[in-house]
Amino acid sequence: MKNDKKVVAEKLRRRVYGDNFSFETTREVESLDKVIGQQRAVESVSFGIDIDSPGYHMFAMGPPGTGKSTTVKKFLEGRAPEEEVPADWCYVNNFEDSDKPRAIRLPSGKGCEFQDDMDELVDELENEIPRAFQSEEYQQEREKIQEKFQQKRREILQGLEEQASERGFSVLQTPSGLVLAPEVDGEVISPDKINELSEGQREEINNKRQDMEGDLRDAMREIRNLKQEAQESLRQLDREVLGFAVSHLIDELRNKYSEFDEVIEFLDEIQEDVLDNVGSFKNQGRDKDREAMLAEMLGHKPSLENYRVNLLVDNSDVEGAPVVLESNPTYYNLLGRIEHKGQFGTMVTDYSMIKPGALHRANGGYLIVEARDVLTSPFAWDALKRALKNNEIKTEIMGQEYRSIQAQTLEPEIIPLDIKVIVIGDPLLYYLLYNLDEDFQELFKVKADFSIQTDWDEETEKQYARFIGDLCENEELNHFTPEGVGAVIEQCARMASDQKKLDTKFGDIVDLIREASYWASSEDRQVVDAPAVKEAIERKIYRSNRIEERIRELIEEETLLIDVRGEVVGQVNGISVTPLGDYSFGRPSRITARTHVGDKGIVNIERELEMGGQVHNKGVMILSGFLGGRFADEIPLSLSASLTFEQLYEGVDGDSASSTELYALISSLSGYPIDQQLAVTGSVNQKGEIQSIGGVNEKIEGYFKVCKMEGLTGEQGVIIPESNVQNLMLREEVIEAVREDQFHIYAIEHVDEGIELLTGVEAGRKQEDKTFPAGTVNQAVAERLRRLAEKSREFASDKEDK
């Protein structure tokens, strides 16, 4: 029986031999031109990129380390150069409302050129404007206007003085304006002397003054009109001079950008603004700082700086569509921000302080973000969805719509958005978003599902060799021999726990390649062979297995009670897997069962203490179904039984120990002892069929190490499900022990096979009369259950009589 169920050493690990490859080192292999094992995901990415319909953004899902970001970015970098380069975007001043800057779209490369041209225009204006007002022609024209005004003013005053003289008055100029003063004998008399005159003389002077005041007002009004005409003439002269000075500069730009209406409109507004603010620009050389600061305090800034261009997106150096990987997708890093600066105790801003975000840089191309990062950043996810739904980028203060008091800031013109967004995350996030976020289904219609495994065949082996060669070349690592490549591939199969699959979590694979190169270099080897790879694996285990070694020490000290010799009724060695981050190990646990009269059924102590997970509790409850189906045809299943993991101080979950618990229960019921040299793993269903479990390699190796520590007897081993044989990728020391018959691995399909291995007694098949053959384990169990039922009935009858 035992020999029939043994797994031979050749089936414990799939090998990769050096003669599978035709190269001496990976330096000779071709570069890898495709993604390994992700055909489904690559086709999904290709579909998502090609389809040009709304809502077909992408979610690349898969466990960490499967190369989602690298694959997507590499794919896009191969596709993007073939596409059209998107436009440049600029923000310029809005002369009608400076709080609402205008956006200008220009072909790729034109934005940078436009910015340089406007900077050059500002520099030229700074020189031309002062020079225009310092010219001799300008000074002569200005003097003519002023002289003309003075001449007419003198004529008006002269006529007024003549009229006043005829009426006995003189016209005097005072700080408050022109006044009439009476004369006597050709001399102006003071107010004191007027009071000395007779009442008739004073009345005569007042009557004449009243007659003259009308003429005086007319003269003053005429002088004011002349002054306004003169000032208007001077302003017109300034506009003409300044217009002549700047028009040829702006006309050159008009001709250059004649096909861009928005630029022409902006240039027209600049020219109009120059002429409207001629006074400010004329005096810009005097008290410039004071006037500029005063203008800023008043909320207006007539400055040549307003004519410069804020180049938001410059695609002059971009080849094809941009591919942006935003590693920190916060709200402002996605949508851009409006910066402020302190001035006169307040915060001010303008269009030049608008900064771009990832959506601006990726506009017309592709944006890649991590799901976890964008979801955990405040407002970022909602802002991204809003931008994609509306196909526009609106730069504003974060959470502006939720503020009770709106802060004064800029409202930049909205920029149209044309983009493909690829969100990268694990499957849990995808399904949570799909089920809980109704916008997600409408926006991310393409799912690129990255697998953690790929088929292991000859072609895949060659691809892994090319991958190793590329990494060694790019990072200047030591190249690998065929045997070294084979050792890496075997480790990938162990990571996948499958003899037909290879792991595609390339983050871990890259680490192994780097560490193997390091250990080869530390021994002055120029290439990496199989021993160097094994050294890297062993060293990594050593760095992580302190707790595993401590547990074995506790077993050796008999602090943790594990028997690997002898026979015990109702006691089985189960094996569990303990994960410790990047390292997992198997450890044996003693599982015991006690059965007695009662009607409580099977009591799982871990469940009663809430230490068992739901899956583990389900596995225990399945045992009742198995016992009832096998032994309760004629009699009721009346018993009380307790099951527990001895010395277990943490929670337990999973059903991989359900067969182990069943064996302990059957041993307790039948009275047949269990061989403690064997450990068991595997789940069981209600029909008694043994089902596969996870972590089979770690479980076998964990028990083997304990047996080796206690001393191998040649009879020790592990019973595993038959379906797990394809998952075996055991370490060499276990394989060697099996080859030398020092350790054994048994593969079974049914619980009866396990009973026979553990007890050495035939399990016994149910006969037509629903009994079991004498001397079998099942017959002993049935008999014990019958006695327990009878005792329960007798006890119940006595109790009823009493």
Image (cartoon, rainbow, N blue to C red):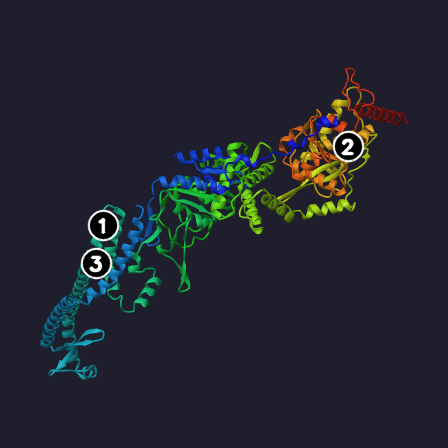
Q: CA distance from mark 3 to mark 1?
A: 16 Å
Say which element carries label 3. helix
Relative to 151, say whether 491 is above or below. above
Question: How far across and down, in percent of the image, does residue 313 sit?
Answer: 36, 49
Q: Nearer the viewer, mark 3 or mark 1?
A: 1
Relative to 705, 135 lies left or right: left
Q: Residues within 10 Å of mark 1 (few under 14, many from 20)?
A: few
Q: Which numbered circle lies on residue 664?
A: 2
Q: Are marks 2 and 1 in contact (CB under 8 Å)?
A: no
Label ID, residue 256: 1
Tag of residue 246: 3
Q: How many residues crowd around disc 2 within 10 Å: few (fewer than 14), some, or many (20 or more)? A: many
Question: In this rendering, would 755 be left or right of 63?
Answer: right
Q: Which amino acid type is marked by label 1?
A: Lys
Indicate which disc residue 396 carries: none
Please tell me which residue is depicted at 59% across the width and 45% down the height of the picture. 532
Q: Is residue 415 or residue 509 the one in the foreground?
A: 509
Please state which of residues 45 and 351 is positioned toward the viewer in this rendering. Answer: 45
- Answer above or below: position of 426 versus 181: above
Residue drawn at point x = 20 percent, y = 53 percent:
251
Any part of residue 694 in sight: yes
**Image depth: mark 2 or mark 1 in front:** 2
Q: CA distance from mark 2 to mark 3?
A: 100 Å
Q: How many marks?
A: 3
Q: Mark 3 belongs to which amino acid?
A: Val
Residue for point 26% across, 67% down: 285
Quarter holding residue 772: top right
